[in-house]
Amino acid sequence: MWLDLGAAFAQSRRVVCLVALASMLAAAPAAAQMTTTPAAQPPVRNAQGAGSGVAEKVDPTEIRGLDIRAGVALDEIFTDNARGVASGGALTVQSNNTITTTPQAKTSDLVSRATPMLSIVDRTTRLQAGMVFQPSYQKYALAHDLDRFENALQGTASAELWREHFFLDGSISMSSEIINSQAAVTTNGRTLDTNRADLNSYLLTPTYRQAFGTFALGEVKYRLGETSSGAIAPATSNDIAATLRNGADTDRLAWTFLLETSRTSQGATPDAGQIVNNVAVPTATNATSRDTGTFDSTYAINHVVALLGGFGYEEIRNGSLAENPKGPIGNFGIGITGARSELKVKMNYRYGGEFVSVDGKYELGPQLRLTGSYNETVTTAQEQTIDDLAALRLAANGSLVAGPSGQAYVPVNSTLGINSGIGNTAYHDNVARLGVNGIFGRNTYTMGLLDETRTTQTTNFDETTMAVSGGWARELTPLTKFNLSLGYTNTVERGAVQRTDNTYNASTGLSFQLNDSLTATATYSVVYRRSNQPGQDVRENSLLFGIRKSI
């Protein structure tokens, strides 16, 4: 049905002011929410590259000392499918991961959203800390049962408590995430109570380091992590690692010796076996234990080419694995380092098989970077969330990024959601990624390619997703910017039900800077999912008008 604009405007008069102020802004769907900190950019390098003897340029966006920023965003979103209803009705995921539909018509609505933001960054010689707090409240003009408040907090800190010896690192993430990409989907960063969960994770890592002259550097690290969402079992991870690596005496040979033991315990799942938020909550839980000892080395043949190699022993224990990996492991390969490029290619013998891993990057320009990787692991959804949080870093410009790649950190680093059907089970994960991120002239580019396959051993579940996304932003005038983003995701599930989904999304619009601290936005977004299961196609169109005030 079409939106009754008279009723909607009567209950949300602020849209009149927003439309009057907004000359229009746009961005990707996520940009409907506030941008918390400047986008992470690759480091600026000199034309000769590292090792040329010429000093590298200083990043003009680098933050030194204490930096505090605040603001608020007010959005009005017109949508023709407020509840994410599919062609056959409302979607519910059953205990065997089949999805049923309950007859229900699409309903239009007007959503008013307020999003305050607080960013605190402190970068000193012995402290690197950053936090972004960005809660939001959504008010529906007609569907009052969808009204809700959402927390969003991300932060990381690294402190040198005893100079050169004792360090303390910590990270935290609180967000609202999609549970299953096959259930209800929406545009403009909206999540629905019928397919969402509050994902809360934290890490605390004390580290002791000791130099043994110039021969070697030793390190002992303890990592305590915890994650919970309600969609799968909560988990607590304890990890102890002892590392000894080469010191300054080494000329061509760099080496690292590692001993590590960890245990990730899964707690009881609330409402196990029940349908919560239209998604089945898994019943079985299993702890994961890992014991690893490895020796890895890099031998530089010259300043460009290096030989890579390593060996060790590993044992992984999890009750949901048909065969627990146990025995010798090893790898060998080659590393190439150029003025603007880095590439590592290895042949690995691990997890009961052989596979090739790749990790590389290439500087396309002073502020434009291409990155790519492929790897395989045996893990669980909980371990993956904790490991992703462990990669959270504070960039020089104050943004929160996922490790040295400089890509934006996301709490669930998969398009499949928190629980796409695997639940608490351990799985073999094959992941390939390719990305472009940066600025060239007046244009800002983002591109991502993801190919992921997850396979379980005891629950006969196999799923593959291939996702392509691209974004382009151009400065039309000093005050006006144009944004366009496109995305496509193909998901194939081979379990109790053979299912294939193709999801398309697009967003475009304009932004206009009214003054130094006030920006107006307008964005049109569309999402369309086509499924081979009858009655489970989803489509939504939305139009967003908003303003952002920086303080």
Image (cartoon, grey):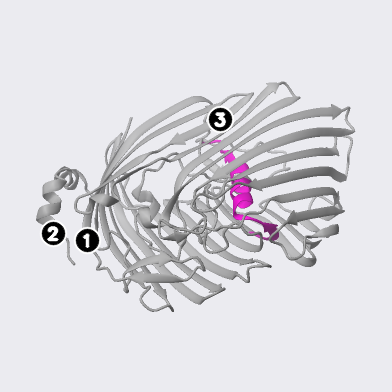
Q: Which dot marks residue 544?
A: none
Placement of 45 over or under 311, stated as above or below: above
Residue position marked by numbered label 3 in the rendering: 129
Q: Name the residue located 28 percent from the left edge and 63 percent from the top edge.
A: 541
* Type of amino acid at the residue the image marks with label 2: Asp
Q: Nearer the viewer, mark 2 or mark 3?
A: 2
Residue position marked by numbered label 2 in the rendering: 4
* Type of amino acid at the residue the image marks with label 1: Ser
Q: Nearer the viewer, residue 333 or 110?
A: 110
- Residue 228 position in % (x across, y down): 54, 45
- Residue 462 position in % (x across, y down): 60, 70
> Rounded to the nearest whole Å, what is the CA distance between mark 1 and mark 3?
43 Å
Query: Within 10 angstroms of label 1, few (less than 14), some, or many (20 or more) residues?
Result: many
- Residue 521 position in % (x across, y down): 28, 48
Residue 45 visible in the shown view: no
| Magenta highlight range | 373-397
